[in-house]
Image (tube, helix red, strand yellow):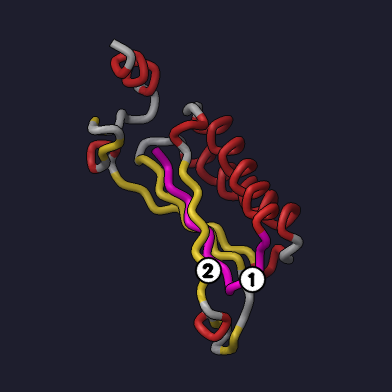
Amino acid sequence: MPIYTCTTAESTLDAATKAALAAEITRIHSDINHVPSTYVNVVFNEVAADNIYTDAVPARPLLITGWVRDGHPEAETTRLAMEVAEAATQITGIGKERVLVVFESSPAHYAVEGGRVLPAPGEEAAWLAAATE
């Protein structure tokens, strides 16, 4: 259901670090938003070092954008952002001042996964049960 895109300059993160960060983002999202880990997508996007700027100078931040369904409690979404940012800092060694986590959201019915319109938050169990029928 959710999509997380982690953007960095080329060669900032090695394969093991990416795998660890993807696993932790997945765990955090699953725990907070009560969805199976199989529905959490994490994508790494590396760009040339001269294509990322902060304060108009080349930089090496870790930019994490996530798409989530509208309707989750605001406090939980803030907690999600904080926990993902903390995990990113711990796992990658990138300082917290260079980690940015931003969520975008839209109604669940704007998305389709596995050929089915996504459920609204709180309706996941019925949606998952219907998939096995």
Task: State left or right for residue 99 relative to residue 89.
Answer: left
Q: Residue at x 26, y 41 (%)?
A: 111
Work out which quarter of the rendered image holds the N terminus and state it.
Answer: top left
Front residue of this view, candidates 2 and 82: 2
Distance between the Cα atoms at labels 2 and 1?
8 Å
Q: Which residues are magenta?
A: 1-14
Residue drawn 44% across the image and 34% down it:
39
What residue sits right under mark 2 in the picture?
46
In contact (CB < 8 Å): disc 2 and disc 1: yes
Question: Would residue 47 be found to the left or right of residue 62 on screen?
Answer: left
**What number of labels is visible?**
2
Residue 1 seen:
yes
Tag 1: Cα neighbours inside 10 Å, few (<14), some, or many (≥20)? few
Instruction: Give the image location of residue 109, x and y in percent.
Output: 23, 37
As displayed, is residue 120 above or below residue 81? above
Q: Circle 1 — which element?
A: loop
User: Of residues 44 and 125, which is closer to you in this image?
Assistant: 44
Instruction: Determine whether 98 is above or below 131 in the image.
Output: below
**Three-letter code, disc 2:** Glu
Asked if residue 2 lies in the magenta stretch, the reply is yes
